[in-house]
Amino acid sequence: MKVLICGGGVIGASIAYFLSLRGIEAVVIECNGAANAASGKSGGFLARDWCDGTPVAALARRGFDLHAGLAAQLPGDWGYRRVEALGVVAGGGRDLSRFGRLPPPDWLGAGSAVHGRLSTPDTTAQVHPAAFTAAMMAGATDRGAQLVEGCVQDLALTPDGKRATGAIVDYAEIAADAVVVAMGPWSLLACRWLPLPPVFGIKAHSLIFDYEPSPEALFADVETAGEEEAHPEFYPRPDGTTYVCGSSGEQGLPLDPADVAAEPAAVAQLHRLTACVSPGLAASRVLAEQACFRPVTADGLPLIGPVPGVAGAYVATGHSVWGMLNGPSTGEAVAELIADGAAATVDLRPFDPARLDPLDPQAFAIK
Ligand SMILES: Cc1cc2nc3c(=O)[nH]c(=O)nc-3n(C[C@H](O)[C@H](O)[C@H](O)COP(=O)(O)OP(=O)(O)OC[C@H]3O[C@@H](n4cnc5c(N)ncnc54)[C@H](O)[C@@H]3O)c2cc1C
């Protein structure tokens, strides 16, 4: 059996890895380099129980456990470690003395205070997202999977449109027994090819600093002069850097993933927010100012499962803010679905693509 996976982000790489564990031929088609998009530019924060009480709980718990197992089994170093998370308030001329019950990490500025411990290392962890995605891809290719550079332009279907037979990649057809759409927010393009609900891209900016403080992940609530309240997140990493994300953007999703660009106003805002929380971090060398889009669906839940009415076609996207956490559990479940006809490790019914109306391709013109 040969499976084409459209998209080389964490979801595509994880599906390829778990298919390859079963000896199934997996071919990942990626147009702009693996992990070039959100899967290379995310926070990489993992939480076992922060999705509890939602339909994503089982996927998240399985994802958290798989991450721990992969860190122990798979070769490579992607900075996996258990971390605690702290809630921080900063700026706005607030009386911080009423928050400061916990001692702040020494890299926080005088205008910041810790208002609570959000988790302990028992239930939260982190990875370097690009390195993790690369390790999953390498784990797949070591077991026979292929990573092919190319742009998926269409699906190949039988004349009655009821079965996927491959994909059109750079004007040539690649035949396969099954095809998985895992193009993150660009999975929207697949609505032209398949009866799929829309996926939207929500933009966020991030900065990477050459600065390694103590390892706590910080979730901040910041008020800066003249600006609305903002909620940047801070992830020190064991590679000697600190990642900060938070500001959204004005520009919509470009057709080509290579055209995603950071916007100066959003980058400047993120620098101001960083300075508000940690002047020392803000003063350190900037290694990257970047942006990416997270994939979201109309009801906020991922789309994971068979495409209705088209045998051999599957979709796995829409993971929003938890794609790094839920990449491995999604990859494992999709591999089970394709190989065995049903997922055994996670109940995929909440993520059935058939729960949402498909987008009418006529109503959606991409020029
Ligand atoms: C700022 C930010 C911080 C985040 N922090 C976290 C976090 O801390 N923890 C967490 O769990 N999640 C986090 N996320 C969410 C997570 O990053 C995403 O959910 C996840 O990366 C989505 O992975 P993906 O593989 O679906 O999509 P993507 O990473 O977008 O990958 C899709 C791939 O498809 C390729 N592609 C697109 N069109 C085509 C085509 N036509 N042909 C071939 N290839 C194509 C693209 O080039 C891209 O590589 C964060 C997201 C953002 C934006």
Image (cartoon, helix red, strand yellow):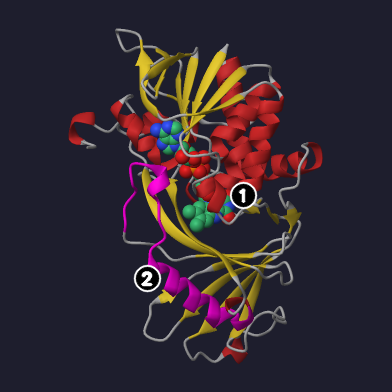
Q: Nearer the viewer, residue 241 or 230?
A: 241
Q: Position of residue 335 (x, y in %)?
A: 60, 24
* Identity of the residue furthest to the top in this view: 159
Q: Taking 260 as reference, is 212 left or right? A: right
Residue behind mark 1: 129
* Identity of the residue furthest to the right in this view: 72
Counting residues from the N terminus, which is met first, the one under dot 2 or under dot 1?
1
Q: Is residue 257 within the magenta segment?
A: yes
Q: Residues within 10 Å of mark 1 (few under 14, many from 20)?
A: many
Q: Residue at left 31%, top 13%? A: 161
Residue behind mark 2: 265
SS for tag 1?
Answer: helix
- The numbered dot on residue 99 is none
Q: Which of marks 2 and 1 is in front?
A: 2
* Mark 1 CB near ligand 1 (8 Å cut): yes
Q: Residue 342 occupies which quadrant of the picture?
A: top right
Marks 2 and 1, how far apart in space? 25 Å
Q: Can residue 55 be seen in this view?
A: no
Q: What stretch is highlighted in magenta?
A: 251-280
State the predominant SS element of the stretch in magenta. Answer: helix
